[in-house]
Amino acid sequence: MRELSERQQNMLGFIEEFMADYGYPPTVRDIQSGCEISSTSVVDYNLKALIQKGYINRDAEVSRGLQLVQGTGRHEELPDTVAVPLLGTIAAGDPFPLPTADAQGVETIDLPQSITGSGENLYALRVKGESMIDALIADGDLVVMEQTSRVENGQTAAVRLKLQDETTLKRFYREGEQVRLQPENSTMDPIMCDATNVEVLSRLVAVWRFIG
Amino acid sequence: MRELSERQQNMLGFIEEFMADYGYPPTVRDIQSGCEISSTSVVDYNLKALIQKGYINRDAEVSRGLQLVQGTGRHEELPDTVAVPLLGTIAAGDPFPLPTADAQGVETIDLPQSITGSGENLYALRVKGESMIDALIADGDLVVMEQTSRVENGQTAAVRLKLQDETTLKRFYREGEQVRLQPENSTMDPIMCDATNVEVLSRLVAVWRFIG
DNA sequence: GCACTTTCCGCACTAATGTTCTGAAACGTA
DNA sequence: TACGTTTCAGAACATTAGTGCGGAAAGTGC
C-alpha cells in the first residue's frame, strides 16, 4: 500500500464523504468540482493511481462505478462486536479447558469490541456449579479468558498446581520464589505455594452474568 | 407504507442485491435486464411508484441516483450493539439511582444486542466498594438494571425497605404477605419483611466485570 | 542544461443513462 | 359495453459521464 499524494488523499476523502452523504459513488465530474480540480482527465489519472495503490476498485465504462476497498479508509466503522468462541462449561474439579484449534460450528458469543479489544486468544466458558464462588463467580456465569502464560501481579488467572494436579481461578501474586494465590472473596485465606509448582493457563478477562 | 406489486417487489429486491454486490446502485437498464422488464419506461414508472410508497429515494437526472430508505428493507442488518446509558456509580448506603430523563452527554456502554434485547428501560451503574459482595458483585463491576416495579420470584432486584429507608440488591421471593430477600451468597441469611414495606425499584439484568 | 517521469490541462468523442412521448394492453367498475 | 385507471411497450431524445489524445507544467537525477 503505497503513499498517496495530497490530491489523492483529498479525492479519497471526498469519495468516502460523498458516499456517506448520498449512498452512491460520485462521478468523475463530482470529484472534479468537489476537489477543485481543473480537468476530468486529472481526476481519471488519479483514480487510476488510487486503483494501482489498492484503495479503490473501478468498473470501466460504468458511471459512478467506484468501490472503496475495505480496510483502507480512515473513517471506516469498526465492527461493533467480536465473536468469542464459547468452548463449553467449566465445573468444579474439571481441568480448566484450553482453546483448541478453531473447530467449525463452535457456538460463539458476541462481545462489544470496546471491551474485548482485538479479541485475540479470547474464549469463553460457561460456569457450572459453585466452584468459583470464592472468585465472585456464580453458577451460570460466563467467563471470558485469554490464553496466556504470563500474568501481572494482582490479575486473576486460571492456574494449575502441578503436584496436586488441581486447577483453580485465583488472583496471582508473585512473591520471590513463592506464589500467593488469593481468592477474590476477602473472607477466605490465600494459598502460598512454590513458583515452580504453578502453571499459568489463562487470564481472566471478564465475567458476564446475565439474568433472563 | 402501501403494498407493492410483484414487479415492484422484484425490483426492490434486485436493487438491494445489486447494491450489496457492487457497492453502487443499478441503472434503470440494469434493473430492466435484471428483472426481465421489456422497457426502461416501465422501470421508471415503477421506480416512481416505489418512491411514492416510501421505499426508495431518487435524485433526478443523476445516474444510479437511488437510495434505499432505511427501515423498509427485508435484508437489513440490525445494529450489533445497544448503547446503554451509564448513569453513575452506586456505593454502599447510597440510595439506588433511577434513570432520569435522558440527559444529553451521558456516557454509554455498548452491550451486544443478543443480550440486551431491545434495550428498553435499561441503564448501567458502576459499583463502588464492597456493598454488594453478598450478591457476588465486586468493586468496579458494572451492573445493568431494568427499571421496573414488577419482578418474578427468584429474580434479583433493587428494593427499598421503606421503614428502614434502605436500598439493597437481593433475590426477591414473594411468600404470601411476606417478602423474602435472599442474598446471592448462600452463606448469608435471608431477610424477611412485610410486603408493604418493600418497594421494587429495578431489576438486575446483567453483571459485567471487566479486568483490564 | 538535458533527458525522463510524473502530474496536470483542455477539449472532444462516444457510450452510458435518465426522461419523455404516444399508444396499447390489462383491469376494475358501473 | 363504456369508461377511467393502472400498467406496459417501443422508440426517440437529451444529458450525464467515462475515456482518450496532444501538449504543457512540474519535479528528478545526471
Image (tube, coloured by chain):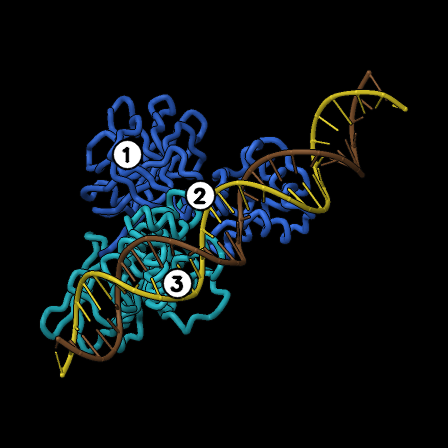
Chain colours: A cyan, B blue, C brown, D yellow
- Quarter of the image containing the N terminus of chain A? bottom left
Residue drawn at (36%, 44%) of the image: B206
Residue in front for this viewpoint, B75 or B8: B8
* Parent chain of label 3: A
Label 1 Cα neighbours within 10 Å, binned few <14 / some 14-19 / many ≥20 = many
Marks 1 and 2 belong to one chain: no
Residue in front for this viewpoint, B34 or B118: B34
Q: Secondary structure at mark 1?
A: strand
Q: Which quadrant of the structure image shows residue B125?
A: top left
Residue in front for this viewpoint, A197 or A174: A174
* Parent chain of label 2: A
What is the total number of numbered labels drawn onto the structure image? 3
Query: Gap between marks 2 and 3, in whole Å?
Result: 21 Å
Residue in front for this viewpoint, B177 or A179: A179
Residue drawn at (54%, 53%) of the image: B18
> How far across and down, in percent of the image, does residue B144 sit?
33, 40
Marks 2 and 3 belong to one chain: yes
